[in-house]
Amino acid sequence: MKKKDLLDKWLNDELTPEEFEVFRTLPEFSSYQKIDSFVKSIDLPRPDREITLKELKLKLKDANRARKPKVRSLPFIYKVAAILVLAIASYFFISNLEVSHRTDIAVRLQFELPDRSQVQLNNDSRISYKKFKWNSNRSLALEGEAFFEVEEGETFSVVTDAGIVTVLGTKFNVYSRGDSMSVSCFEGLVRLTKGEVSIELTEGRTAGITNGELELGQTYVSRPGWLYNESAFEDIALRYVIEELEKQYDISIITENIDVNLRFSGSFPNDDLEAALQAVTLPFNLNYRIDNKNVVTISGAYGSE
């Protein structure tokens, strides 16, 4: 039997007489005996079970209390500061929220701005502005076309990708798609700004920007034609007229053998596709065919069928 096994059995008082005789022959036997005698001589106190249980519960309670985070009340001044910071953050968040109005193809929308200025938004267009800053900054962004009847007050600005229109109180129309823009003043005074160039338009005057070039014109109506279900243009590239046809009638137009940069002045109705196609193609001696409900082909006189 191994020394370790003999020692384990001796400690547990499990040695047989024969095994004990073998264990006594071990060189460490005398040391084991001294250790055993010393341990037995120690007078260990017998624990009182009730007292021990009570002490254990108290120690556990103290330990749990120590683990709990201590909640300390903030001084009044810090509470006020925290409320102010939250209020300021909320104000800036709300004041920078944008209000947007958007129309789909063949859909129009009329709405009122916070100062009671009136806006009529043409189809496939979008306007956005900051409602809570409106009184101090009457400025909005436009993509597409809109007619404005502006209440008098601080400067009113319409910002587009092609230029900026500013007024005080007036009626005017703004068209802006891509790099093309046109402004018509129907009442009051309008200022059109493109980079370093700035021009003022009085009642009945129009201005257009195409490919960076500024062109002036005149209008003889009191409101834009699209408000009466008609799209009107003054010296504008044919491609923009075709794009407007697509938006008004929710169709796709294919062009064949035509110069889409030809200049067009005129109008077309927004409720009769045949009449609209004739109004656009006849001045240029162009052909058209309606391939199906949603596709139209416009071609030159020598275009292939």
Image (cartoon, rainbow, N blue to C red):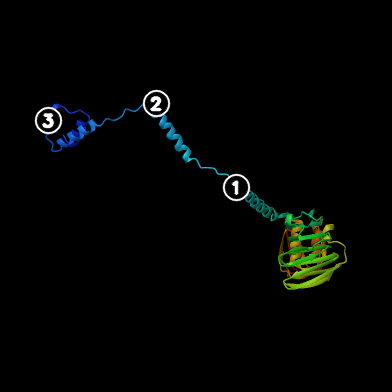
Q: Residue 69, image x and y in percent?
A: 51, 42
Return the residue at label 2. Answer: 50
The disc labelled 2 sits on which kind of residue? Glu
Quarter where residue 157 is shown: bottom right
Q: Residue 219 or 271: which is nearer the viewer?
A: 219
Residues at discs 3 and 2 in contact (Cβ within 8 Å): no
Quarter where residue 17 is shown: top left
Mark 3 and mark 2: Cα distance apart in space: 45 Å
Location of residue 3 with respect to 245 vertically, above or below: above
**Mark 2 residue element:** helix
The disc labelled 1 sits on which kind of residue? Pro
Q: Which mark is residue 75?
A: 1
Say whether disc 1 or disc 2 marks the residue closer to the N-terminus.
Answer: 2
User: Which residue does the image show at 39% across and 26% down from the upper left?
Assistant: 50
Return the residue at label 3. Answer: 21
Q: Residue 123, image x and y in percent?
A: 76, 57
Mark 1 and mark 3: Cα distance apart in space: 80 Å
Mark 1 and mark 2: Cα distance apart in space: 46 Å
Looking at the rendered image, the disc whose residue lies closer to the viewer, 3 or 2, is 2
Give the position of the N terminus as an image quadrant. Answer: top left
The disc labelled 3 sits on which kind of residue? Glu
Say whether disc 1 or disc 3 marks the residue closer to the N-terminus.
Answer: 3
